[in-house]
Structure formats: structure tokens, C-alpha cells
Image (cartoon, rainbow, N blue to C red):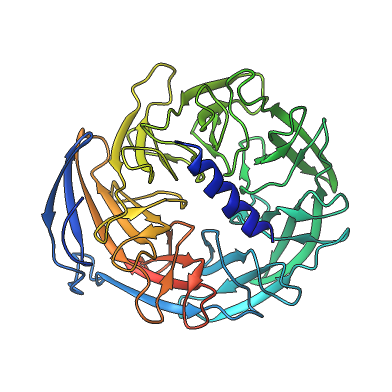
Amino acid sequence: MKYFYRLIFIFVTSLLLSGCGGGGGKTACSLAVGSLACSGLNSNSGSSGSNGLTTTYSVLHSMSNIEGANPDASLIQVNGVFYGTTQAGGAQSLGTVFSMNTAGQVTTLHSFVGGATDGAIPFAPLVAGSDGNLYGTTTNGGSNGNGTVFKITLSSGVATYNGIVYSFIGGLTDGANPYGGLVQGSDNAFYGTTTYGGTYNLGTVFRITLVGGVVAEAPIHIFSGTVNNDGSNPQSGLIKDSAGLLYGTTSAGGTGNVGTVFSISTSGSSFTTLHQFDTTSGAIPYSPLLLGSNGNLYGNTSAGGSNNLGVVFTLPTTVGGTYTVLHHFTGSTSDGSTPYGNLVSINNNIYGTTWFGGAKDSGTLFSITPIGVTSVVYSVVYSFGSSSDGANPYSGLTLGPDGYYYGTTASGGSNSIGSVYKFYP
């Protein structure tokens, strides 16, 4: 049910905000920061790259309800094995944790049951801790019903669900309902965001430490929305730079009440709003940021832009830096719309996904190349939704041990409840 609440939140906030031609194949758009010109490219031909890998897309696995349904999170890869979450399905229809090999064989590691003793409805990816174990969040469940942090132990290649590490309290002093995942700082503490809770019930940035079996959690920032123009209701996790500074987005708040980009120190003493969205250049970001090889931040918004269908943007990590829109989504049959998934860098090119748009209006896989120049080429690499293909990807790509990239779709597949696919650009 929380899944539908989130979609309703997206829909309502988008309503409040007031192409490229060609077929369903691969289309490229050359733009000089905002100006768009199209040139047709052939659809994926299966040609072999210089490393011997084949340019290809294929569905590896269609999710079944007992394995888990509607995976919204990106996969992570540890020692050649992928791990992921689903926000529905499983024994109690409250989501699962699963593993998968490169052949697409899926094993359910845990079915969430909710209630006071377990989490429920995970939207976020897992993270591998420095202790060799996996950690994740659920939006619901736990002793207070406000979500949890949980642990998966990895020992000799065997993954075991280890239960709740922390149950969020909510209220004035703690966060509630984390939709984003965790990131581990250089101090070995984990950092994340909650969408609600805190003084204004507009979300928090929190730190959680696990030392010698003792768990300590506390917010390091409480969002105030338009009160201090620091943003509100973060929907994604944080990223960190080499100096340990954290970066994130909020889906609302700021001067336009349509989201912000911020940085924060791990102590919480230094919080900086780097950008406040204004609808015309993007609004309502839902995905984590990407730190490019040039030191700039890259991200996307689910709405706003010239067509109110989202944008891809870049900005420096310093205050006062120039915010630049790299692409305005059009939602046509040859372009995507409404991106929710995180961006990834592959050979200094950016790849991402959209929820809608493309030949079947079931989402796209796109690329922007290259990083670091003002004139870029935007390409729709693949349109989802054909036959038993996956549809509506909510997540980004993950590098596998074989050099291919792997991702999930939230719907589609032979059972219409999501899939795992394999791709090489």
C-alpha cells in the first residue's frame, strides 16, 4: 500500500507544478546545454565492442510473487553475486531480499513480515558494510511502525537475514519512513535520510553506528521545508566524496517547494543548500546524485523542465556554482519521461532510466555523453515494454563481474511484476 501512496505523492506534487522524432529505436539528440537537435541512430545491432563484449539487452529473470514483486531498488554486487530488494511480494506481500547470479537464478533470502519484530516494504538498495555484511532500510515495520535498518550477514558466501538493527521512532526527535538507502562514512558509521519525522515531520538526515553490538542512532539534520529553505521529504539516499562530505536531494521544500540539492558534513554541523529547484529547470528529484569524474554532481528530477516531465542536470559541489540542464525529457516515443532511477557513469558517459516514455510508454534506458563538456549527445538506448519485456524501471544500472551491467524493472516481465535485465552499451 505504501507503494501506491508514494505514486500518489508523485502524481499530486507533479499536478501542483501548474522531440525528438523517429521510431522506437535508438535516437540521439545533440544539445548545447538546452538546445536540442536530433539525429537518428540505428537500434541496438549486437555489435561487438573493443573489449569483446556484445552491445546487447536481454531479460535475465521475470520475478515471481514468492520471490518478490516490483523491485524498485538498484542491485549491488558482492563477490560475483547480486543482491536486491523488492517492495512487494514474498510470503506476506511486504517485500523481500533476494540474491541472483549472472545467469539470472534468483534465491529469496528473506520475506518481510512487518509488525514489531520485522521491517516491511523496502524501496532502497542494500549497501555492503566494511564488516563484510549487507545493510538496508525498510519504509515500514519495526517496533514503532516507522521503518527499520536491517542486516544481512555474509559468511563463506552464505547470506542470512540477521533481523532489525534499528527501529525508527518518528515524532519530534527521530526520523520516520526511510525510502533511501545507506552510505558508510569514513568513520564507519552509516548515514541516510528519512522522508518523514523530526520537528516539522519533513524528514531527517541520520547517523547510525554499530560498535561492539551497541547501536546508536540520531538525526544530524532535521529538515524544515520552506522555513529555512533547506528542503523537505528526501526520497533518496546520500553519496559521499573523497573528503567524506555527504550530498543528497529533497523532493520538496526550498523557495519553490519543489526540492533542493544539499551537502552536509558527517557531524551535521555544516549543512549547505547547493540548489533550489524552480520547476522550469527541474522539480521533485527522487534519485541519488552521481559524483562525476570531473568533480561535479549529476542528477535527474522526476518533473519540471520545459515539458514538466523531468530533466537531467549537473552542478558543481561549491556554493554559487552554475546549475545546468543537460536534457529536458519530452515523453515522446523516441524519448523518456519521469526519471526515478539513479545515474551511473560508464566510460565517462552517463546512463540512466525513465519510468515512462519510449516506444511503448513503459520507460527507457538512456545515455548522455560525455561528462565534462557543454555540448553533449543524448541517446535513447532502449525502450522497455515489448512483449514479456520488463517495464517501468525505477532504478539504475549495476556493474557485474562479467563486465555487463544489470538492472531491475518495477513491472513487466512474464508475470507483470518486474524483471531483472542485462545490458552492455
Camera-nearest residue between 59 and 277 = 277
Q: Nearer the viewer, residue 40 or 356?
A: 356
The image quadrant that residue 120 belongs to is bottom right
- Residue 294 visible: yes
Q: 78 or 332: nearer the eye?
A: 332
Residue 49 lies left or right of residue 283; in this view the side is: left
Q: Residue at x 68, y 55 (%)?
A: 135
Residue 402, compared with residue 33, is above or below; it is below
Residue 136, image x and y in percent?
A: 67, 54
Position in image of residue 261 (x %, y %): 49, 30
Q: Eyeballing the image, is 26 above or below 342?
A: below
Q: Is residue 103 above or below residue 163?
A: below
Q: Residue furthest left?
A: 39
Camera sees residue 425? no
| Count of marks overlaid on the render | 0
Instruction: Tell me the quadrant of the picture where the N terminus can be found.
Output: bottom right
Q: Is residue 227 left or right of residue 211?
A: left
Q: Residue at x 44, y 56 (%)?
A: 396
- The residue under the point 39% across, 59% down is 356
The residue under the point 82% across, 30% down is 172
Q: Which of the 4 quarters of the picture holds residue 189?
A: top right
Q: Quadrant of the C terminus?
A: bottom left
Residue 190: image location, x then y, percent:
68, 42
User: What percent of the width, then of the height, locates residue 274?
Assistant: 47, 23
Dividing the picture into quarters, in which one does residue 112 lie? bottom right
